[in-house]
Amino acid sequence: RINGERLWASLMELAQIGATPKGGVCRLTLTDLDRQGRDLVTGWARDAGMTVTIDQIGNGFMRRAGRNNALPPIMTGSHIDTQPTGGKFDGNYGVLAGIEVVRTLNDHGITTEAPIEVAFWTNEEGSRFVPVMMGSGVFARAFTLEHAYAATDTEGKTVKDELARIGYIGEQEPGDHPIGAYFETHIEQGPVLEDNDVTIGVVQGVLGIRWFDCTVTGMEAHAGPTPMALRKDALQVATLLMQDVVGAAHRHSPHGRGTVGMVQVFPNSRNVIPGRVKFSIDLRNATDALVDEMADEVKAYAAELSEEMGLPIHIELVSSYPAQGFNPGCVDAVARAAHKLGYSNMPVVSGAGHDAVYMAQLAPAGMIFIPCKDGISHNEIEDAKPEHITAGCNVLLHAMLERTGV
Amino acid sequence: RINGERLWASLMELAQIGATPKGGVCRLTLTDLDRQGRDLVTGWARDAGMTVTIDQIGNGFMRRAGRNNALPPIMTGSHIDTQPTGGKFDGNYGVLAGIEVVRTLNDHGITTEAPIEVAFWTNEEGSRFVPVMMGSGVFARAFTLEHAYAATDTEGKTVKDELARIGYIGEQEPGDHPIGAYFETHIEQGPVLEDNDVTIGVVQGVLGIRWFDCTVTGMEAHAGPTPMALRKDALQVATLLMQDVVGAAHRHSPHGRGTVGMVQVFPNSRNVIPGRVKFSIDLRNATDALVDEMADEVKAYAAELSEEMGLPIHIELVSSYPAQGFNPGCVDAVARAAHKLGYSNMPVVSGAGHDAVYMAQLAPAGMIFIPCKDGISHNEIEDAKPEHITAGCNVLLHAMLERTGV
Ligand SMILES: NC(=O)NCCC(=O)O
Ligand SMILES: NC(=O)NCCC(=O)O
């Protein structure tokens, strides 16, 4: 069993770097604060006898040797960058849980057969630089190192320059080493475990995501003198389509998700009929076939509406992340560990993207979720209970040991 | 018959003051440009032998004596302030049409029985200072002079100081003199006349207006990990209510109008379920009973939705303008003039508020509408045809002469 108090203390210490007055953390990727966070974590790793390697995109690999170092490492990890108004647990938990696994093995003098690596991936959040999950994406060759290097923040600073500036541009080529298996512990970022009063979520896979921008074009006109029959009210048409985004998710339950998160109305004046409305569409489901079916339905309804109302509707794909089922062996290892340790557990899906999605393209992978308060993340009030933090890390320990061999 | 070319030339000359590159006019109330406009117009009035009086709220009364100056004047007018991206015709046309009526009477050596007054009302547009229709509102005692004086622009400047600065704070007490009748010519600001290919709109009255702000409060959450059943999506509920605003207008045809012009979504992020949505509601109809019925229906539906969805919905009245039917005698005088002059005409309602609404509380009043291109106003591309400008002014001349006596 891991040392829950030590893990909690490390989480709280790391959360001091970039701590916000409201109890959250703002530690954007590749800032000075990110460097301080990286320095603290790699220091802990060295103290625990691990070797540290940084690759060209700044991903960190903290390695504990095994008996047979020719075996590919059993890896765990996550990220330590946060949202601008982020919390103490998102990502950070997954990295420090890995360190705690190693510290626990040290405490008990256990040497594993295969080596263990704890990774922190650069820029998972995507708040400062797009795309999200940048470090793991480069590692998995979802896009090139050059593409990632060229990304700029709002001030025009590039990933490459910022990596060099904070001293975390390594020599190792991303993705050059094989991985035996990958596990990632993470707060759920949703309300399902809490709602079911369950400690461990055995993650079956990650939903496929499609992001679209939709623009409805009408004709702006004075709200008073323009009779209803002569209007081209872009918002009125847009609201019908916004409802269908949610409708499509309900039609494709249980894992369908449909969200309109962002809306801009032009000219946005009280007595002017909207001439143009732009809004985002976020569709998710357990398989790519299902999420594509949802997208097709929304597009078909948009075409129908456009025809019926005589207003152009333009829908553009912005990003697409394929659905990713996790390796049955890894999923079972997580479930077995939770059962053995006596933690209540249930199969769940991850609705949010994670570095584990890219790792699953390279190696057998699985994730362990724990509840977070009210399902809230990406918020300074993000919170998790110490007993759940401990439980998730114990499950990680046992799932990893099953794979490393002892 | 009036001199259409002279009227057009005056309109174009006034439009030079504050002319915008796109062919519009930006002459905000109580600015230096407004002073230049006032100076030009009062100069024309004096050239036409009129006396000019300014009242304490800066309304201007340009008077042509009659044979019997004990009779209350027959008045016409409008405003010469514009929207920030306004056009050449809105308001300006109504004032210059009045001047052209006087010039025409001078040309023909006609003396009327009752005197004639041409008014320009301060701050009709309400873009710089609220409330709208300020000068006519003070004149009609809808609110006090002190209330109007205290209004501030975004820089904190008051109406009183700005009036004094441009030298248009007069001595006459607003509303101190009785009016025999009031007529106002105006571009329609809507598409009905153009749609019916009709030259003169015989305005029956002005719709009642109710402005509300509506806030739907949900719970922001991550768009991925939050299942549909556990969401409190403020936008999803708001879109249903937005549709009912339009629905209420359709249920109360032909004059019902329902518009959501302004929407703010919080936090307005692609992968966050909206936690709060704020939007404006603009309801209008021909009688106060009808517009109140529309408001009651929308509020009842909001209460039902709130109950059903478990999300608080708050609806707050922002402004209310009563419906105003025009005096049947004045309405008929407009219709008779149009018939006599051979202009196609039809009864219409004004969907927008005008200074004539306040004048109708003091005296028999009526309005004359002419078509504007594509029904567009409050826009630099606002446009009207010279023959319509001429026609409206001819109708004004004859309607006024019927009331003044010759
Ligand atoms: N874990 C996480 O918040 N990922 C961001 C991308 C998304 O799933 O919306
Ligand atoms: N004439 C006009 O545009 N009035 C503004 C107030 C309104 O009717 O919305």
Image: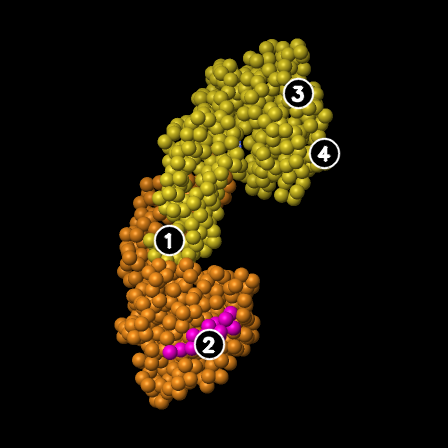
Chain colours: A yellow, B orange
Q: Earlier in the sequence, mark 3 or mark 1?
A: 3
Quarter of the figure that contains the N terminus of chain B: bottom left
Q: Amino acid at mark 4?
A: Ala
Return the residue found at the far bottom.
Answer: B67
The kind of secondary structure element at disc 1 is loop
Would you say B248 lies left or right of A356 here?
left
Q: Amino acid at mark 3?
A: Asp
Residue located beneath label 4 in the image: A164
Badge number at residue A142: none
Q: Is residue A236 above or below residue A143?
A: below
Q: Residue A181: where, in percent of width, then height?
A: 58, 17
Range of magenta residues: B1-15
| Chain letter belonging to callout 2 | B
| Chain letter belonging to callout 4 | A
| Chain letter belonging to callout 1 | A
Same subunit, labels 4 and 3: the answer reads: yes
Q: Is residue B12 in the magenta section?
A: yes
Same subunit, labels 3 and 1: the answer reads: yes
Q: Amino acid at mark 2?
A: Arg
Label 2 to label 3: alpha-carbon separation: 83 Å
Q: Amino acid at mark 1?
A: Arg
Q: Earlier in the sequence, mark 4 or mark 1?
A: 4
Residue located beneath label 1 in the image: A231
The kind of secondary structure element at disc 2 is helix
Q: Main secondary structure of the magenta part?
A: helix
Label 4 to label 3: alpha-carbon separation: 21 Å
The residue under the point 35% across, 86% down is: B112
The kind of secondary structure element at disc 3 is loop
Residue located beneath label 3 in the image: A176
